[in-house]
Image (spheres, grey):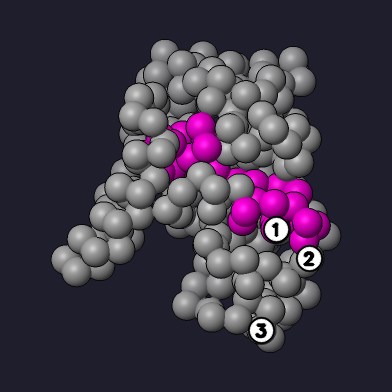
Amino acid sequence: MRSFYDIKKLLNAVRDTGINELDTARGYGGGYCEYVIGQYLSKEQGAFKINTKVGFGKVRLRRLPIRLVLPAKFYFKKYIVKSKHIKNESQLDPVPIMKIERLDFEYMKNSIELSFKLLGTDYLNALFIHELIPEELDNRSLDFLFELKRQGRVNCLGIGADARKVRLTNTLEGFDICQYQYSHYQEMKLQFPQLSHNCFGVLSGVRNPSGNNVDLALSALGNEDKIVFNTSKIHHLPLRR
């Protein structure tokens, strides 16, 4: 979005609509998303439960002020990305994100602590490992995540990844949520019935988020399952459930 004022206006509308949970990540917005949300919550404490992620796309703290960054990113996306059809790597052939890799413990720990700092909170509703499965974390890293939950700093632990990658895991013990594209919901629900399921992609290409396809998707979800969506349009927010 073009300015912090626009972001505040949207988040106020989201809050007033009754949506009380935000999904973000260390890698979103080149590292600025958590900071912007933290700035909003510093004035609106308790307005939202926050979910964030660690793993995919190693991002360091950016230092340029958001009054410069937001318009620069807005116009870059509007005029440069669209004209050149630049795509994010995760939107290309899914093979690259299916590779089994290792997440460095020190990076993971520092990244999570930075998330707490940027968001201005000591508590997260959910913390996801991003485009990773537990087999890509060593025991030290897993113990650190479980300790955050034992300490009450994190309510839920999750996996946010391509569904095909999540299905490669042999164990999700200690995790509570998996987040993936909606088209895989039925098979994932059968494979991991013990988990809550967050689904994205339901609104892809949909101009009217309150349309029948969304109602059908909502009716198909289990009680603890959710749709994750993103928008910059306040008029999309009548989606209330």
Q: Would residue 10 be visible to someone looking at this image?
A: yes
Please give the residue where the numbered disc 3 appears in the rendered image.
211
- Is 213 within the magenta? no
Distance between the alpha carbons at the discs numbered 3 and 2: 13 Å
**Is disc 2 placed on a helix, strand or loop?**
loop
Residue 172 horizontal/vertical position (percent): 62, 38
Judged by depth in the image, the label closer to the viewer, 2 or 1, is 1
Q: Which mark is residue 241?
A: 2
**Is disc 1 placed on a helix, strand or loop?**
helix
Pick the front one: 153 or 167: 153
Dot 1 surroundings within 10 Å: few (below 14), some, or many (20 or more)?
Answer: some
Q: Is residue 232 above or below residue 106?
A: below
Dot 2 surroundings within 10 Å: few (below 14), some, or many (20 or more)?
Answer: few
Q: Is residue 21 above or below residue 68?
A: below
Q: Is residue 12 above or below residue 220?
A: above
- What span is in magenta? 9-36
Please give the residue where the numbered disc 1 appears in the rendered image.
13
Q: Quadrant of residue 48?
A: top right
Identified at 60% across, 81% down, the residue is 208
